[in-house]
Amino acid sequence: QVHIVESGGGLVEPGGSLRLSCAVAELSPDNSAIGWFRQAPGKQREGVSCIAGTDGALLYRSSVEGRFTISRDKYRNTVTLLLNSLKPEDTALYYCAAHAGDWCSLFETEYNYWGQGTQVTVSS
């Protein structure tokens, strides 16, 4: 059983920053990919960013590229998503997901393991 725990959400004003963290156990960081997804009320869940294991390939959703940064600490087996220049439309429940393959994808069907989510609210 793979356990994923997200942390770091909260309430921030527009233009502010947050750091989300995802701790993954039972999967090797060299042979797994981690994705961040989000779901706003009344909307479908969408891929935000991902990072592959072996080559560290990255992907970003176009609406967050240049504002969000994903990184991985293989020693601690954690993945961090840094959210800068936040906008009200970034408000959502953010999920971390993992799969035991070495490709990066923003499609949720690729992922086998999911965390419970952490809320990000951007409001003045």
Image (cartoon, helix red, strand yellow):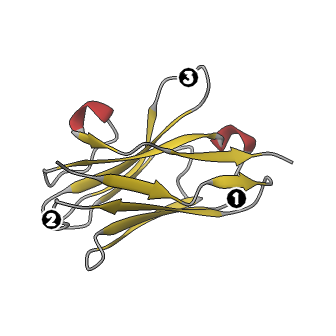
Residue at the disc numbered 1: 85
For marks 1 and 2, give the one nearer the viewer.
Answer: 2
The answer to whether mark 1 and mark 2 are in CB contact below 8 A is: no
Closer to the chain start, of discs 1 and 2, is 2
82 vs 84, left or right, is left
- Label 2: few (<14), some (14–19) or many (≥20) C-alpha neighbours in 10 Å: few
Three-letter amino acid code at the position of disc 1 = Ser
Residue at image coords 26%, 75%: 74
**Residue at image x 39%, y 55%?**
5
Image position, residue 44 (x, y; %): 49, 23
| Helix, strand or loop status at disc 3 | loop
Q: Are marks 3 and 2 in contact (CB under 8 Å)?
A: no
Query: Looking at this view, is 15 or 34 the one in front?
Result: 34
C-alpha distance separating marks 3 and 1: 22 Å
Residue at (20, 66) in percent of width and height: 29
What label sits on residue 44 in the rendered view?
none
Calculate the distance from the C-alpha at mark 1 to the C-alpha at mark 2.
Answer: 32 Å
The amino acid on which the numbered mark 2 sits, given as a three-letter code, is Ser
Q: Could you say where residue 91 lies in the image, as x and y percent from the top left?
A: 66, 41
Which residue matches tag 2?
28
Q: Secondary structure at mark 2?
A: loop
Mark 3, other Cα within 10 Å: few <14 / some 14–19 / many ≥20: few
Q: Which residue is mark 3?
A: 43
The reply to whether dot 3 and dot 1 touch (C-beta < 8 Å) is: no
Q: Nearer the viewer, mark 3 or mark 1?
A: 3
Among numbered discs 3 and 1, the one appearing first in the sequence: 3
Residue 95 vertical placement versus 32 (above, below):
above
Q: Which residue is rendered at x = 80% and y = 45% of the image?
A: 123
Q: Position of residue 45 (x, y in %)?
A: 46, 30
Within 10 Å of disc 1 (Cα), the crowding (few <14, some 14-19, many 20+) is: some
Q: Residue 14: percent from the left, percent from the top?
A: 79, 52
